[in-house]
Amino acid sequence: MAKDEKIRKVFADNLKGFFIQKGVTQKELAKYMDVSAPTVNDWLKGRVLPRMDKIDKLCVYFNVMRSDFLEAPANDTPPSLPITKLSSEYCYRIPLLGRVAAGEPIYADERIEGYEFIEERYKDDGFDYFALHIQGRSMEPTIMDGDTVIVRQQSAVENGQIAIVLIDGEDATAKEVKEGPEGITLIGHNTSVYTPHHYTPREVMELPVRIIGKVVEIRRRIA
């Protein structure tokens, strides 16, 4: 490996570690650094090494020294990283919500319980994402009580897909969706807990019944 390539890799690995530790997004850092998000992505991929004045500005942002970016840690782990090093594919941060309720902003501060990291490829697809902590057994065995789902915010899904649906007066619910001229049917995979609920077009409009996102990933903690 050429010397300049090695330096870029060391810098990129250290930057990834600081990203995870601080919980920052590429967009947030790009704004602070007055550069484009693709430029930050090039830094994280090790394609480009920032100018020294940019590195010094990064040091101020992350409250570290220049050597923390340019020197490999003795144990080959990003400085101060509290967890196993993650690849650059998982450096896009999204809010983890405890619940989503009718009439309340999705990203209300009081709803944010923490953050999840998702693959970088989601970043530029034009959608917003959030994570939702699932409570209840209506979608077992597909989605278990305590799982976390990654949700792409959108107002419609294809039939048979799992969506996060908001019904007026209730918290959001994860259900398989079937929609047609006769209305919308929400299907739970655990019929002993939740039998299919059908809503006519009028009920969809008046309640209302509103799809707020598509479940694109399910995460399960294993003790």
Image (tube, grey):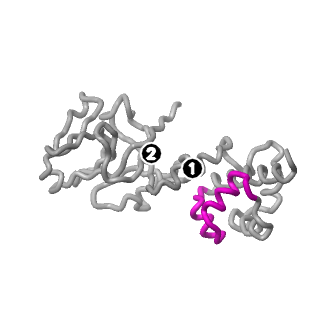
- The secondary element bearing badge 1 is classed as helix
In reply to whether residue 46 is colored magenta, the answer given is: yes
* Residue 182 numbered tag: none
Q: Amino acid at mark 1?
A: Glu
The residue pinned by badge 1 equals 120
- Location of residue 175 in the rendering, given as x and y in whole percent from the top left corner: 30, 40
Tell us which disc is closer to us: 2 or 1: 1
Is disc 2 in contact with disc 1, using a CB cutoff of under 8 Å?
no
Give the side of residue 73 with respect to residue 137, left or right.
Answer: right
State the residue at coordinates (73%, 69%): 57
**Sequence order check, earlier mark of 2 and 1:** 1
* Residue 150 numbered tag: 2
Give the side of residue 67 with respect to residue 126, left or right.
Answer: right
Looking at this view, is 116 or 124 the one in front? 124
State the residue at coordinates (37%, 31%): 142
Looking at this view, is 150 or 132 the one in front? 150
Q: Quadrant of the N terminus?
A: top right
Provide the residue span drawn in magenta: 23-48
- Circle 2 crowding by C-alpha within 10 Å: few under 14, some 14–19, many from 20: many
- Location of residue 218 in the rendering, given as x and y in whole percent from the top left corner: 45, 38
Q: Amino acid at mark 2?
A: Ile
- Circle 1 crowding by C-alpha within 10 Å: few under 14, some 14–19, many from 20: some
Quadrant assignment, res 208:
bottom left
- Location of residue 149 in the rendering, given as x and y in whole percent from the top left corner: 43, 42
- The secondary element bearing badge 2 is classed as strand
State the residue at coordinates (45%, 45%): 150
Looking at this view, is 207 or 98 the one in front? 207
Quadrant assignment, res 163:
top left
